[in-house]
Image (cartoon, helix red, strand yellow):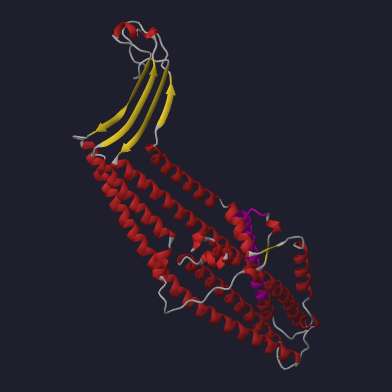
Amino acid sequence: MKFRLPRCLRSTNLLALFTAVLTIAARGQAEPLPLERAIRLALAHSTGSAIANADVQRTFASYRELRNNYLPQLVLGSGLGWSYGFPLTIEGAAPALVNVVAQSTVFNPAQRQFLNAAKTDWHASEFQDKNQRNAVIQDVALTYAELAKWEARLVRLQQDEAQAQQMEQAVSERLQEGVDSAVDLNKAKLAAARVRLHRAEARGSADVLRRHLSTLTGLPVSSIELAPETIPALPPVASEEDLSEKAIASSPAIKVAEQHSLAESMRASGEHRSLLPSIDFSAQYARLSTINNYNQYYKNFQPDNATIGFAFRIPLFNASQRARAEAAEAEALKAKKQAEATRDQVAEETLRLQRAAEQLEAAREVAQLEYQLAQSGLEAAQTRVDAKTGTLHELADARVQAAERYLLFQDADFEYQRIRMNLLRATGDLEKWALPVAASTNPASK
């Protein structure tokens, strides 16, 4: 028995078109948010970047604190007081109307090593800041790409849901006419329910990702409108190239671990050098008063007094300091092994990402070809139905298969993007890919 396809299935999907128009109208006032602008907003708004930058400032201040020990420290004070009998000291200093003290380090091998360690910590915090910057860029790029995936899926699922509902209605009418069975109706209901499930999943995931992107960029949720065409094309992966060496040379995590190891080694050396002689500069001026009985107990009293000279320290025996030096050596050895472990981990992870990217690129191509075949099958089924040589259920099955293949292709495509972005970060090329203009003008990125 031949049948005529209902007009609602052969006409333009007005319901899906109307829904898409409403969605566009609801966001009509929103300005498109390119990926590059989203990344720049996130870098300016990120709390993680602010924390890393504050850590850079802290380590730089610690370095300057030790460096400035070689500059004289001037202290102006007064030890006013009345004396009965011999003039005793007030907090270790002679009572004086005015007291000026200047002190600085002249020669201190341990201090020099501690200064170098602080400088190394400062450079390590700069690499950590760069690592945090890459983490923010990766987070925004992945969130942006995944949100674009779910939004595209929602548009497709709106059409699929309208078609599934129309198919369910058509099968219900055919059931009343005695053409189809109750099993056919249940199959149509199942197909519609699956579409609703996929749509609910897509809507929930899109809402969560939109909220996360809003948190990253500081923009209101309602003002975020993606521009998927602004996502740069991912460069191909050369299978014959070993990216592990490139990752080792550019990885901020490795540089942080190496700088930390170097700093700990310098601190251990400084602890050992604390057993060496040191020289400090010291000068003092005091204006004394007769109310403290100086003229009674000292033969030649004068109100203005000054002392300038150097203090020599030669440690003879300090078992506690030797133990502290041995502990610092152990800490330096630990930091060295941690740096080696970080280097091995980065090399292995980069190789894993490279091979995974190659595999996922092939899987994406397979998924794309399967989707194209399913879409061709859907078009062929539609043609046969229009020519009245095919069945309604063949068309429904072709639509279900095309829809499922589309979802699988989307998932494979995003998974490839995710692994590829991870690989770009591992090799130090993520910022060049996401912010090509900034990377080309920023000397620190070279």
- How many numbered discs, if any? 0
Q: Along the line of sight, which residue is nearer the eye, 38 or 11?
A: 38
Q: Is residue 56 left or right of residue 192?
A: left
Q: Along the line of sight, which residue is nearer the eye, 337 or 56?
A: 56
Q: Is residue 237 magenta?
A: no
The x and y percentages for residue 46 are: 57, 52
Q: Magenta-highlighted stretch: main secondary structure?
A: helix
Q: Is residue 119 above or below residue 26?
A: above
Which residue is painted at 57% across and 62% down in the image? Answer: 438
Q: Is residue 169 left or right of residue 50?
A: right
Residue at the left extreme of this rendering: 317
The x and y percentages for residue 182 are: 69, 79
Res 37 → quadrant: bottom right
Q: Is residue 383 left or right of residue 205?
A: right
Res 395 → quadrant: bottom right
The x and y percentages for residue 271 are: 27, 42
Which residue is painted at 25% across and 33% down in the image? Answer: 313
Would you say residue 197 is visible in this rendering?
Answer: no
Which residue is painted at 66% across and 72% down in the image? Answer: 195
Q: Is residue 91 above or below residue 206?
A: above
Segment tinted magenta in the rendering: 190-219
The x and y percentages for residue 222 are: 71, 57
Res 410 → quadrant: bottom right
